[in-house]
Amino acid sequence: MKIGHAAALALVGWYLVTPPWQKGKNAVEEKLDAPLSKWIQSHAFDSAAECEALREQVIKAQKDAGISVTAERCVASDDPRLKEQ
């Protein structure tokens, strides 16, 4: 691996994102089909492993509280879908 390529990889961070919300007939609903650029960034991480660890904690806490699990995702900070409009 070239040094420049390794340096570029080191600059990539990770975001935990959640889908945007909309009012539904009986409740607030997640817009899972929204473009990733519209999703809400809730946390930033230095590694995918850190992001996934928190995502799993959130899912467990939601299940334990009887809340339907939301669709959080871990996304690389350089993912081009974050910039799409």
Image (spheres, rainbow, N blue to C red):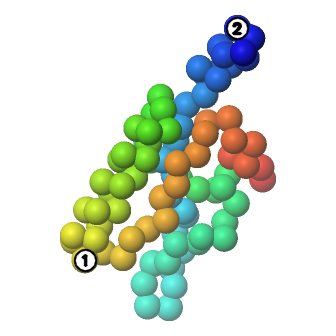
Foreground residue among 54 and 67: 54
Residue at the far left in the pictured view: 64
Q: What element carries label 1?
A: loop
Residue at the far front in the pictured view: 1
Residue 33 seen in the current view: yes
8 lies above or below 43: above
Q: Which residue is identified by label 2?
A: 3
- Mark nearest the camera among 2 and 1 is 2
Q: From mark 2 to mark 1, how far is it between C-alphas?
A: 48 Å
32 lies above or below 4: below
Quadrant of the image containing the N terminus: top right
Q: Are marks 2 and 1 in contact (CB under 8 Å)?
A: no
Badge 1 density bin: few <14, some 14–19, many ≥20, Cα 10 Å: few
Residue 75 horizontal side relative to residue 51, left or right: right
Foreground residue among 40 and 54: 54
Measuring from the top left, give residue 48's x and y in whole percent: 50, 38
The mark that comes first in sequence, 2 or 1, is: 2
Could you tell me the amino acid type at mark 2? Ile
18 lies above or below 29: above
Give the label on residue 66, or none: 1
Which image quadrant is residue 10 in? top right
Measuring from the top left, give residue 39's x and y in whole percent: 58, 56
Q: Which residue is at 30% across, 54% downward?
A: 57
Could you tell me the amino acid type at mark 1? Gly
Badge 2 density bin: few <14, some 14–19, many ≥20, Cα 10 Å: few
Q: Which residue is at 52% across, 48% downward?
A: 74
Residue 57 horizontal side relative to residue 45, left or right: left
Q: Which residue is at 48% across, 32% downward?
A: 47
